[in-house]
Image: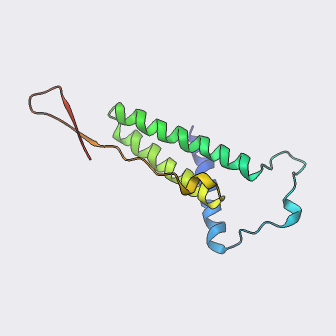
Amino acid sequence: MIATTRRRGIAALAVAGIALTGAFAVPAAHATNNDSGDYKTKEQRCEEIGGWFDKDVQDAGAADQAGDAAGREAALSQARLDLTLARGAGCDWAGRAVIPTFGRRAALPTGGATVFHP
């Protein structure tokens, strides 16, 4: 999992660097499939990143439900990186996606009940 997180983090940084330099134009020679099989179409890449984003959001929700604030924040941070990567790759869904927020929980003084604050 750490290796996957590291790869996505590095990929997000690479896309951000490319976007900042304005070198987002791809030469026509690179627009076709390469021999190594590593090349993905924009749609495939966006679908892959979308899967990462969805999983990270689900992980954040599960961590929130479990009361794991550190796990929730780590998953949300990764989801933010996924969204940045998707926007840099020009994924249509990235313009509509939002990072969810979760309410803070506070136990009532009478015990047992949970209150959600926006």
Furthest-bottom residue in view? 21
> Which residue is rendered at x = 13% and y = 27% of the image?
111
- From where the camera sits, is residue 3 visible? no
Q: How many numbered circles does the render carry? A: 0
Task: From the top left corner, tell me how far across and down residue 97 is, in percent.
Answer: 51, 51
Q: Can you give x and y, in whole percent of width and height, for residue 101 in the image?
A: 37, 47
Which one is in front, 94 or 84? 94
| For residue 61, side relative to residue 113 (left or right) | right
Q: Is residue 18 visible?
A: yes
Q: Name the one closer to the observer, 67 or 26.
A: 26
Image point (36%, 36%), residue name: 64
Residue 11's place in the image compared with 47, above or below, is below
Q: Quadrant of the N terminus?
A: top right
Foreground residue among 62 and 2: 62
Q: Residue at 37%, 42% (x, y): give it.
A: 70
Does 51 sit left or right of 58 as displayed? right
Residue at image coords 60%, 56%: 85
> Does residue 2 lie above or below 43 as drawn?
above
Q: Is residue 61 above or below residue 98?
A: above
The image quadrant that residue 19 belongs to is bottom right
Colouring scheme, one of rainbow, by chain, secondary structure, one colour: rainbow
Q: Position of residue 88 (x, y in %)?
A: 62, 61
Residue 20 falls in which quadrant of the image? bottom right
What residue occupies the far left of the structure in this picture? 110
